[in-house]
Image: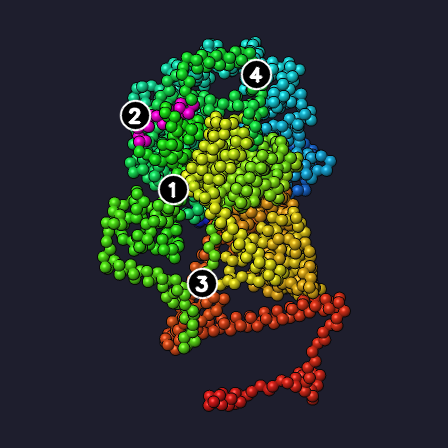
Amino acid sequence: MSTTLPLSPAVAAVVSGQMRSVSIGSLYSIAESSEPISENDEIQRVNELQTKGDTAFQNKDYLEAIKFYSEALEIDGQKVEVLSARAAVYLEVRQYDLAQRDAEQLVKINPLIPQGHYLLAVSLDNQSQYDKAITSFLSALDHDAEHAEQLVDNITVVASNLCNFNDDVIKTLEDVSPLQKLAEVGIQLHSVNHHDLCIEVLLRAIKLQPEETKYNIQATATLASSYLTLKDLTRAKHYFLQCLTLAMKENNTEYESKCYVNLANIHLLENDIQQSIAYYEKLAAIGNDLKAQSRDGSFPTYWSMELRCALHQNLSVAYKEVRNYPRALHHALLYVELVKNSPDAEFLLPDAHHNAGTYYEMVKDYKSALKHHEAYLALSKARKDKVAMAAAYASLGHVYRILYNFKLAESYQEQYLRMAEKIKDYESQAKALCSIGEIHLMKEDFEKALSFFQQYLRMSRRLDEYETECCAFLKLGDVFKCQGRPQHAQYYYEMAVTVSEKLEQNEDLVNKCRCEVACALVLSVSKDDMEKARLEFEELIPFYSKKIQQFENENIECPTELKTALRNCYDGMQIALCKLEKQENALEYAEGYRQNKFKEIVKLKLDTEDEDAKGPEASYVSFCEDLCKIVNRQSATVLYYSMTDAFLLIWVLKPGEGVVKVQVERAIRESLRQKVRHILEQLQNTDEHKSDLDCENRALPSRDRSVSHLQRKYLAKSKAWKLKEQRKESEKELEKESKVVIPPQRQLYDLMIMPVEKTLIDIKEVLVIPDKELTQVPLDILEDGKGVRITEKYKVTTMPSLAILNVLTRKDTNMAIASTQGNTTSSANLFPMYLDDHLRVVIPPDEKPLSPIRQQLRKAPVMAREKSISPSFITFGTNHYDYVPTPKERLNRAELIVAYEKSKLGTLITHSSTDTEILQGDGVHTKFQQASKQHQSLVIGNPLLPQKLKLHGQIWCPPGELMVSQCEALNVAEYLETKAVIGSAATKDTILNKLCDATLLHIASYGSWEDSVIVIGPSTTSQPNEDGSHNEDNYQIGVKDIMNIDMKAELVILSCCYGDIHRDVDFTLPSALLAAGCKCVMVILWAIPDIAREKFWYHFYKTLQSGNFVSIAMATAKEKLSQDERFTDPMYWSPFLLIGQDVYICVHQIKHAMLDQLVDNAEDEVLKSMPVNALNIAPEPVEVSSQEIILPKLRQSLSALLEHHLEHPKAIPILLQLVAESLTLLLNPQKELLTRKLAQPAMCAPGAIELLNLVGFHFQAKGAESTEPYVVFPHWDHDGLLQPTNQALKALVDLSDNSPCCSALSKLLIASEDVLSGLLDIVSITKHSWEIQLKVTDTGVRSLWGHHICRDFLTSIGFQQVGVLLLFTNTNTNRKLLNGSLHVLAAVLGEKGQAMLDKVDVNYLGVSSRKVRSANSSRPGSKSLKLPSLNPILLSRNRIHMSTPWLSVNGGEEEQKLKIQMAHNLSDVYSEYRYYLMKAHDWHNYTLKPQANQALGSIGETKPKPKVVKVKTGYTASMNRVAVEQESTLTIAGTEQRRDRKSVV
């Protein structure tokens, strides 16, 4: 509350005098608030002096007035009236410094008095201290809003004196509001860099009239800019966000753009690059909208060429910083195009080409990179810019080095070095020396490489840069490492570590040095070095794991260097632990690395709240004891391999014994990994048999195919490389001549089996878990020195890791438990059977089975051989011959058998004498149905592919149809007696649906081990891009697709991914299949002739016809193939590899099951062919109509409409019109709408009739025809579905133009409610709380963004990932899609949906709609009532019976009240029912009769006439007529008489 004082004559005179301030009459004369004074003499004396001073001032005797005021102040120096009067007198006599002193004293005494601030402002203004004067005027304005206009005028005048306003500014200040004046003053102060004053003025302006949005936008933007200039980033960000909110509210795109630019720059200064990208992308969205709105290509003034260039340049640099190189390249190319049309093109274009070339390098498009670097060089030469020319030479040399054109690379780098020497740029000289050294290192010219790296080291010391010196030591260490001199390498790596410790904020380089040192230490023989290495690896493994996880979270391709470093750390840790005799810990790290890879696969599965649905992730282990438990759950001995260049580690794990042996094999001369590669090359004999290799190419082009082609091209031209290869070949030939030739099968056996052969004595089954190159070895070809193959000794299977074995064994256990618990009518489950090692039926020690043991004895070997899961197989010490049951046990067994037989009986439901239905009985009424096993075989081949496909960011045109693949599919389908899915039938949606039910799956198509995908035809709903190409997700089935379906396949055969160029098999795709539910996967390690593969499949499936293990079938097929004289070489028959469990498959059983299913389908077809009402679908009988039942049906119908909206584009608008009219009719019936016909497009669209029936529509056919029937509108909205349906259909009309959105939404609508609830949260937050920035690492976002269908949907409506941020691109089109998606999701999610439609309701945020319903059902008002005297029971078809006889139980007072309440409720129900019954009757009169009359008239029939009723005579027109047949109503007496008569009878 401001305080004002009485105005003395002196002050009033000052105000009326000629002063520099123009605020005439702006001082104050309010006397009501003056305080009462005491009667003290001193106070009286002060008042007298004040009066004399005022009189003297009026007489213009200023000196005398000053004298009296001064005497008064000597008595009472705190009297503000006297102080203000003397200050005014000082102003009159132009003693401004004394006036300033009195005013300052006045403000100090009471800062709430506005007069003090005003007098101080006037005195400062007259002393030309304009900035301080403005501050004082603002303080006066804070305490006196009544005189705001005068004070703002004063501020304007002083600011004009300070800023020298021009005439235009002065003209704009005339006749405007105080807010506008202050805002303009603040802007002018900002323009002359008086930012502190600007902030003070604009803060008062915003406070003065906060409702003035238009001028507050400008003021807030200027205020934020001033804070930004003063480096107060926090306040600048706050006011820019406030300005952004106002601009978006007023749809002011100019200030919205300014806010985005400044917010992005602020986040760049704060090193928050991801958030800055988010604001830049929102700015780019405004540009896209402006471009779409512009017809002639022109833009508003604020959207200048400079702004557009800066936008794309900053975005390219920012995306580079977050390693999103494709996006960086995209904006760099846009920047190049803009710069070409810019007036500053001469200066900006060279750097634009340089940046574009650099980004092309990062995405490994080196051809395009060379073009831009050459353009950069040409433009630099034209400008004679030596620094730019040197940079161009360096870039060209770097690209040619990657492409193995060492001659050109060295030439360009030498030119770079010479130019750097001329301009004396030592940093560039160091880079050039390092690059030349790397070229010689790649050429294996170690001496020259060492020389240049030493020069690089000297130059780095000259620069006095620790980072450069550290890199020089690392390069020197790499040279000695490549030479096989680990001790010298270790020295330089340790020097690098020493230098790196001096670095700050370069943790990556420091840890790189530490990793190299640790890897060098493991080659030592000292235990101290091993311990040092172990400690280093313990710190490095979490560091690199965290770094890689960050890249995964940001959806950015992780650099290969990081993955290699992490793998080296795991390998080094295993070696160090083994040398430290901690073999079990080493096994934990070996499995830990494989488990991490498996976790990456499982993460792609959509998380749910159900623990059982979390998949195998919950079964991860890390301790050796847990690993041994996994081994104990199966019967095979495990050979676990881990291989590095220098060591091969082998663990032998036996069930029940744990780790029994650990073998460490060390490389003697050459690298172990290189040795295995050489052996595999000998085994494949690719060069020798290349002319005979007539094999169809089924491999997708590799990601680096263009780079590999250029590398081979340049290497072929390199003379030095040719001489080097010739020298190596001659050395190999000499080595072969000097040694005895050992076949590759024997070499692999000596490497893998020989070291642990003694441990495998008396072992029948071996499970191999290979590593690196060992995964490419077909294990069944290994043979010992006597020529005995390993398969003749052991039964061999392969597994990627123990984690996957854990998943498979747990699944078998769960299936066995489910079989035991679920099938209560099976005698095998009722009486379990146990077998010992010799397949004898035995008795467990703690329980005695009651089944007849001897009768099951002959079935035991068969069941054991088939590995049946029921009964369980447990080994015990005693057999059935050692046990004699006692008489009591025989009696118990007899009672149990009687109980079992009794449980199969059924009873009929009868009624008691009290007419009460009996609901309980000892038996169960059994429903008999044919038991058809759900086994199926699925064969896929030669899918029909479009002419253009997107692959790795480029266009790939398939070379043609896979005719051999089609023949293979047809042949295999003939073996299995099924129909092959080939050509146009092999679409992605079709195949994904069939994969869930397949027991045996054979795929012959394109594929890629590198990308872990199988190629299949695009779905019919998939839409191509503008260039006619299909995206990868449209035609590829990858790990993310597989992990989101539940498979039950026993065997999956991948006859794909091989071709003219050999590619190593990657276990990612087989691991995903195993994790999804498959038991066994067969792959082909390398290409073989088509005729050999065809013969293999024939013998393979022939062996499986009558039933056999897959390993036996594969061995038989290989044996038959090797007997063919054309294919005796192991190269032809050995590349088939089994991964997973060795399963038993009987093709005859699968055929029989498929025949049973065919019969079942025929029965269903017969039932479907029976006459039914196609228009008015009969509702299924349900116990209670609830949202849990009707909302899923609504979602299914909407999903079907969306899925086929391209085929029936008019269906959704027609349905929307019908539903909207029904809502109108319910409120206001209009007869002209009641004869509506259903249009043909709506009848043909899938889901349309179901949707209309669901919301209450019925139809009346026109005679015998069902086309265009009459519509019977719903007469009431019983389930409350009309409004949500109308809302959803309106939104679908907006979404129907976006095919990707419709396709993804149609799949999501039939997903779980938890998924839809999570999507609703994301969409609602983005729509209503745009200031909240979602992240992909948030709990509710992570799983949805990781799920490919959810991601496709969110991407289609404008979401994209920027680092860990989930950004919404706020264009007009995307806003429309976002709003439509919100309305659809809200319509199908009931209460939560409506709550989140118009705002973000925190009560529902993060809560699924299913939980909302369950919470509502558990409320106190929804509890069921218990009435002991009635005990009503709900029967089928909603019938109620009272199980308690009438008056058998006395009801209490509370029960009587409840009965009365129920009676009233029942009466209300009856009343409501009668109302709706009458309404339905009228409704049908309104609708059916006019429609029927119209139909009768069209065929010439007469319309029915209304019925004539005879009435009694004697009534006038004003009286109610009475029908002749109407009976009179009984009186009370008549009623009692009739009741008495009835009781007598």
Helix, strand or loop status at disc 1: helix
The residue type indicated by label 1 comes to Thr
The residue type indicated by label 2 comes to Leu
Helix, strand or loop status at disc 2: loop
From the viewer's perspective, tell me whether residue 553 is left or right of residue 418. left
Nearer the N terminus, badge 1 or badge 2? 2
In space, the residues marked 3 and 1 are separated at their CA atoms by 45 Å
Task: Inspect the magenta stretch and tell me whether residue 496 lies in it.
Answer: no
Q: Which mark is residue 1422?
A: 3
Helix, strand or loop status at disc 3: helix
Do labels 4 and 1 touch, CB within 8 Å?
Answer: no
Q: Quadrant of residue 760?
A: top left
Q: Main secondary structure of the magenta part?
A: helix
Do labels 4 and 2 touch, CB within 8 Å?
Answer: no
The residue type indicated by label 3 comes to Ser
On screen, 988 above or below 398?
A: below
Query: Which residue does the numbered mark 2 point to in the structure image?
Result: 580
